[in-house]
Amino acid sequence: MTTAADVVIIGGGCMGCSVAWHLAHRGITNVVLIEREPQLGTGSTGKNAGGVRHQFSHSANIEMSIESIAMIANFEAIVGTPIDFHQDGYLFLLSRTADVAAFLKNVELQKAHGIDVRWLSPKEAAALTPGLDVTGVKGATYCPADGVADPNGVTMGFAKGAQAKGVEIVRETEVNGIRLEGNRVVEVRTSRGNIATPVVVNAAGPWAKSIGRLLGVDVPVEPERRHIFIASPPAGGSWDDPANAGKVPHSKLLVIDFETTFYFHREGGGLLFGMGDPDERPGFDITVRWDFLPKVIDVAMRRLPAIADAAVSHAWAGLYEMTPDHNPIIGPSSDVDGFFTIAGFSGHGFQHAPAAGRILADLIAGRDPKFDLSPFALDRFATRTARGEGNIV
């Protein structure tokens, strides 16, 4: 491992790897990316559902989506690595009057940004989604340019591209300290030795707060467990088998019942689904709570009756990295020179990694990122009440 670098990145998920790739393509190649696990992308990146969408309630997030999804759609041409990407759309189902009003405003905002998003009646939503029960649904929004991508493919594509330019990636290494001179970063201390550096990037996802503590900087990111389940047809086989025709969608359309946060999309021959637990408390436990599954099924079978008799063949839990306003933190610390954070995406990090990594790399390289980062500034929590993101699942 090198003993001096221009930039040290802490965290080898999609964010850290995106920053590394974009730095390398700006000529900053004396970079060390540190990952404490044996493999990259095994934290939140490797445990998410892979959704990418334009349907946000905050202009900054919509702009991030436009840039990121454009890059994901052309990932092989830009980065050199093929990835699995399906633009079959996102469908939000709305049952509460307040949500209908909010989403109607969101649709107008998204259209103002040039997004092809459509307001659907319950009947139109049902026609789009075989097997869907729209009882109680008042309306829906649909964007055909949304979809599902491969988090591992994107992360490894960025990582390999960065390495090819000279970035060093160090695995199974723990960061246990960051040394300052005055209020400036000068060194990162790790379990494999120290690295002199003027710039540290905190891309530690749910662990971003603990990295901030090494410098006495408050990074208000809390980990929150989320479950994902895979369901197979009751008789086995695939949902594409003739016996299961019309029970679930054939495409990877991602459907979200916004009131309950239950969502699903096809995953190979199976069906991937999940739901937020309103009783979940912050913590790093990623044990699968099988006692939570009946609560999910109770909600799920009302929207997708085929799930009632399905067999749950696989499950895992990962961590959302939540901020108080559900917007990320991207940018420098005002208290410590050379300390940058890119974390706290509150469940929509993977899909924004291409744009977020580019923006932060521009800042570090001294370029104008051409993006208003004030909604994502670290000090916004202390100085004012920021308008946050409302479309969190």
Image: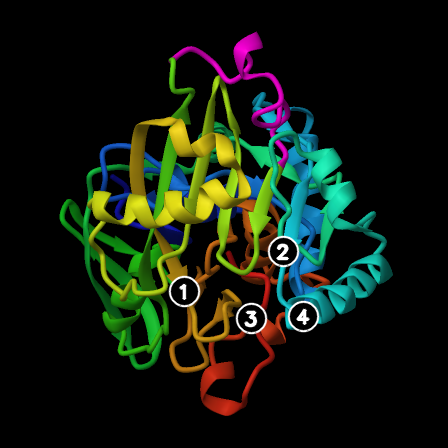
Q: Is residue 64 above or below residue 74?
A: below
Amino acid type at circle 3 is Phe
Disc 2 versus disc 4: nearer the observer: 2
Upstream in the sequence, badge 2 or badge 3? 2
Mark drawn on residue 322: 1
Upstream in the sequence, badge 4 or badge 3? 4
Real-space Cα separation, disc 2 to disc 3, in angstroms:
36 Å
Tag 1 near tag 4, CB within 8 Å: no
Disc 4 versus disc 3: nearer the observer: 4
Q: What residue is shown with label 2?
A: 136
Real-space Cα separation, disc 2 to disc 4, in angstroms:
11 Å
Amino acid type at circle 2 is Gly
Q: Position of residue 115 (x, y in %)?
A: 81, 51
Q: Position of residue 191 (x, y in %)?
A: 13, 49
Amino acid type at circle 1 is Met
Mark drawn on residue 376: 3
The residue at 65%/29% (across/down) is: 130
Range of residues picked out in magenta: 236-253
Tag 1 near tag 2, CB within 8 Å: no
Residue most extreme to the left:
191
Tag 2 near tag 3, CB within 8 Å: no
Residue 46 versus residue 369: which sits nearer the camera? 46
Residue 29 in view (yes/no): no
Q: Position of residue 100 (x, y in %)?
A: 70, 66
Residue 237 on the magenta segment: yes
- The quadrant holding residue 322 is bottom left
Q: What residue is shown with label 4?
A: 97
Disc 1 versus disc 4: nearer the observer: 4
Helix, strand or loop under label 3? helix
Dot 2: few (<14), some (14–19), or many (≥20) neighbours within 10 Å? few
Is 102 on the left or on the right of 287, as rendered? right
